[in-house]
Image (cartoon, rainbow, N blue to C red):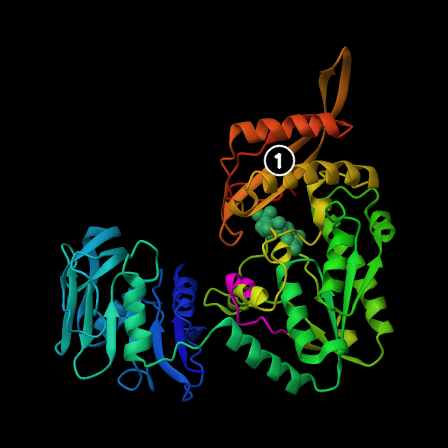
Amino acid sequence: MDKIVILDFGSQYTQLIARKIRELNVYCEIHPYNRLPQLTDEVRGVVFSGSPYSCNAPDAPVPDMEGIKGRLPLLAVCYGAQYLAKWGGGKVQQSQIREYGRANLTFIDSENPLMKGLPEGSQVWMSHGDTIEVLPAGYRTICSTANVRYAGYQIEGEPTYAIQFHPEVHHSTDGKQLLRNFVVDICGCRQVWTPESFIETTVSQLRATIGTDKVVLGLSGGVDSSVTAMLLHRAVGNQLHCIFVDNGLLRKDEFSSVLNSYKDMGLNVKGVDAKERFYAVLAGVTDPEKKRKAIGKTFIDVFDAEAKLITDAKWLGQGTIYPDVIESSSVKGPSQTIKSHHNVGGLPDYMKLKLVEPLRSLFKDEVRRVGRQLGIKEELIGRHPFPGPGLAIRILSEVTPEKVRVLQEVDHIFIQGLREAGLYDKVWQAGAILLPVQSVGVMGDERTYESVVALRAVESVDGMTADWCHLPYDFLARMSNEIINRVRGVNRVCYDISSKPPATIEWE
Ligand code: XMP
């Protein structure tokens, strides 16, 4: 498979470069700038990403260009372009005019292979504090904006290109054409990285790796574990043993409906009802982190006991996806853990199972495309993310089975409402929160003193930042009415209008 290597200098846009290249059906990988992978024959070209650093800073990231520059096609973006200009003897300094946001290309060398098909005036996105003042000899300008003379250049006689703007962001209107020019025309990559090809190669690799061994996989009802299961199932059939644990903290009727979907998909799956165990360990616990830890530990205990019943299992399947892998190996190091997230998997060492993670190279949207290609129902593919500790972290203060029941009813009305109003797919994640307060109300002639719930719906790309959804007032009004009329014990509904940061998506 032809491949592009992206060296990450810490830019916030590095993942976007990878996604844009993958959208061209070309495979690419991100590596930290100081850990260049082996440049095998499959590697057709290299991209240098941007960076928050100035290339004049004493601790500026310095890549090893041996084997790259002049040998393989290279596209240096933003910091990469400035670094390369400085390296060649040019001059880079802080720019006098701010160069952030939209700009237009006033000059384009349309003969240049990188600029082919870009119209004059094309809008590009700039985001840099430094600028190239002097271009080294032998570097030829291929585009300019009104403020940036050396917006792009090529080093004469070699396939080394550089641009100071960001072709990967949406606001660079012809960025995709430019990236296509680079990966397809200049690097010669074949556009064969498709869900079908991914499935085909992954399934045969899984077969070769696993052989006749047994594999254990924890299912959560989420997209990643479901797609992992289907790939493994296609590769090794009933050698795959899936375990789906009911922790009593799932959405209303979710355990049975998801379990049935898994069975319909032909999976060898065992549903384990462990509700009471989870409720028992949660009794009296109010601290959110203690709840997470108690749920995480109980999950492992339950899963471990079930996995042991599968004699001679050698492998543990996991639904790890690419952003998790990049996060933990990026230039900046693993990002700070704000909450101790508990996900399916993460088993104790003594289980001695070898890990198999077929989605390690995929972004979330690619996981969905693969899932569709594998014939997984849209209901499972398009589901909102749902936290491992489930409703426990949406019931503020102590969790009891009765509170779970109330919250399940509220959540069900809200989620069904979103679906019926055609809003579900427009929202990234939604749910309800049961607050630990009672408020006064009046129903008929009776004064009530009952619970308050909050509804939360957010827009996001990856959960790292989020904004609250501006749901229509009449929809919110309908939800409020339905919840108060139908759920006994609730007399007030609020809507959360906080963004992340400074708030988080979950309340605990
Ligand atoms: P926050 O609340 O940190 O949530 O803004 C970001 C995303 O992570 C999910 N989340 C969790 N997922 N275990 C999980 O598996 C957890 O403990 C956990 N806490 C939050 C949250 O639902 C959102 O999608």
Residue 402 relative to residue 64: left or right: right
Task: Kindly identify the amino acid type of the residue bearing the numbered disc 1.
Answer: Leu
Q: Nearer the viewer, residue 465 or 366?
A: 366
Q: Residue 364 in the image: x percent, y percent?
A: 53, 62
Quadrant occupied by the N terminus: bottom left
Quadrant of the rendered image containing residue 371: bottom right
**Residue sitting farthest toward the top:** 445
Q: Residue at x 21, y 70 (%)?
A: 116
Q: Residue 194 in the image: x percent, y percent?
A: 48, 73
Q: Residues within 10 Å of mark 1 (few under 14, many from 20)?
A: many
Task: Using the image, determine if residue 139 lies above or below residue 470.
Answer: below
Residue 308 relative to residue 149: left or right: right
Q: Secondary structure at mark 1?
A: strand
Q: Which residues are magenta?
A: 357-368
Q: Is residue 406 visible?
A: yes
Q: Residue 35 in the image: x percent, y percent?
A: 44, 78
Which residue position holds label 1? 455
Magenta span includes 142: no
- Note whether ligand 1 is within 8 Å of mark 1: no
Q: Residue 187 in the image: x percent, y percent?
A: 31, 80
Q: Nearer the viewer, residue 12 or 430?
A: 430
Q: Nearer the viewer, residue 266 or 457?
A: 266
